[in-house]
Image: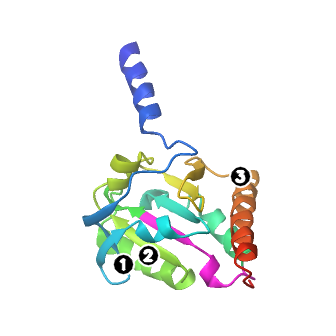
């Protein structure tokens, strides 16, 4: 039994996302489909984005686990133009027992609420396998303008965690705006 626990602990460290790293490039034809247009999804857009971005990787069963961060960030960045709100929510469809036909209308409603957010469906736990993201969780990641992971959390976010995310994102957005002499 001890050996099994040790192996599980080692496996959890191997699969974990590391800060300061750039995940492997993903271009997928099957399994990961964006809702807007039902076409293959690639992380090229975010890799070429020079202001960084926010990524949520969500098990539909855990949808409310960290929902408060979405609402707080939306409120905090209300004054910014949508073009500076770079976020993507990838739904880990394979992690849920809920039928896809019941999940998709909920996502469509979220698309209306957060039009600047891109929603993508991961039917095969591709992000778990390729990037080492947490399965059966609600994970929050922030990527720098170089595509490196600068923040990762798969636990329930406290108010202090949400504030840390807000500060990191604001710093990245403001630096981009100042560097390019753009108004908010």
Vertical side of 2 occupied by 177: above or below = below
Residue 35: mark = 1
Disc 1 or 2, which lies upstream in sequence?
Answer: 1
Instruction: From the top left corner, tell me how far across and down residue 129 is, in percent.
Output: 33, 47
Q: Do the residues labelled 2 and 3 touch (CB within 8 Å)?
A: no
Residue in the picture at 65% in, 52% down = 157
Residue in the picture at 35% in, 73% down = 102
Q: Are marks 1 and 3 in contact (CB under 8 Å)?
A: no
Task: Look at the numbered disc 3 and give the secondary structure of its residue.
Answer: helix
Camera-near label (1 vs 2) is: 1
**Residue 62 versus residue 119: which sits nearer the camera?**
119
Q: Which residue lies furthest to the left in this view?
A: 30
| Residue segment shown in magenta | 78-90
Q: Residues within 10 Å of mark 3 (few under 14, many from 20)?
A: few
**Residue 50 versus residue 5: which sits nearer the camera?**
50
The answer to whether any part of residue 1 appears in the image is: no
Vertical side of 103 occupied by 66: above or below = above
Q: Left or right: where does residue 53 sit relative to residue 132? A: right
Picture quadrant where residue 142 is located? bottom right
Q: Distance between the residues labelled 2 and 3?
A: 25 Å
Q: Residues within 10 Å of mark 1 (few under 14, many from 20)?
A: some
Q: How far apart are marks 1 and 3 (CA)?
A: 29 Å
Picture quadrant where residue 168 is located? bottom right
Instruction: From the top left corner, tell me how far across and down residue 36 is, in percent.
Output: 38, 82
Instruction: From the top left corner, tell me how far across and down residue 60 is, in percent.
Output: 43, 62
Q: Do the residues labelled 1 and 2 touch (CB within 8 Å)?
A: yes
Q: Residues within 10 Å of mark 2 (few under 14, many from 20)?
A: some
The answer to whether any part of residue 142 appears in the image is: yes
Residue 161: mark = 3
Q: Mark 2 points at which residue?
A: 107
Instruction: From the top left corner, tell me how far across and down residue 130 is, in percent.
Output: 35, 49
- Quarter of the rendering occupied by the N terminus: top left
């Amino acid at each position: 039994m001890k050996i099994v626990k040790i192996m599980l602990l080692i496996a959890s460290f191997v699969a974990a996302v590391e800060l300061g790293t750039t995940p492997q490039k993903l271009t997928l034809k099957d399994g990961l489909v964006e809702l807007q247009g039902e076409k293959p999804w690639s992380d090229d857009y975010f890799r070429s984005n020079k202001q960084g971005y926010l990524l949520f990787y969500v098990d539909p069963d855990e949808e409310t686990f960290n929902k408060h961060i979405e609402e707080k960030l939306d409120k905090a960045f209300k004054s910014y133009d949508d073009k500076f709100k770079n976020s993507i929510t990838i739904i880990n469809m394979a992690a849920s027992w809920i039928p896809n036909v019941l999940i998709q209308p909920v996502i469509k409603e979220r698309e209306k609420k957060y039009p600047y957010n891109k929603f993508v469906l991961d039917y095969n736990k591709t992000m778990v396998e390729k990037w080492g993201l947490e399965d059966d969780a609600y994970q929050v990641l922030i990527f720098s303008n170089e595509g490196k992971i600068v923040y990762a959390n798969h636990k329930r976010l406290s108010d202090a965690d949400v504030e840390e995310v807000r500060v990191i994102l604001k710093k990245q957005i403001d630096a981009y705006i100042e560097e390019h002499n753009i108004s908010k």
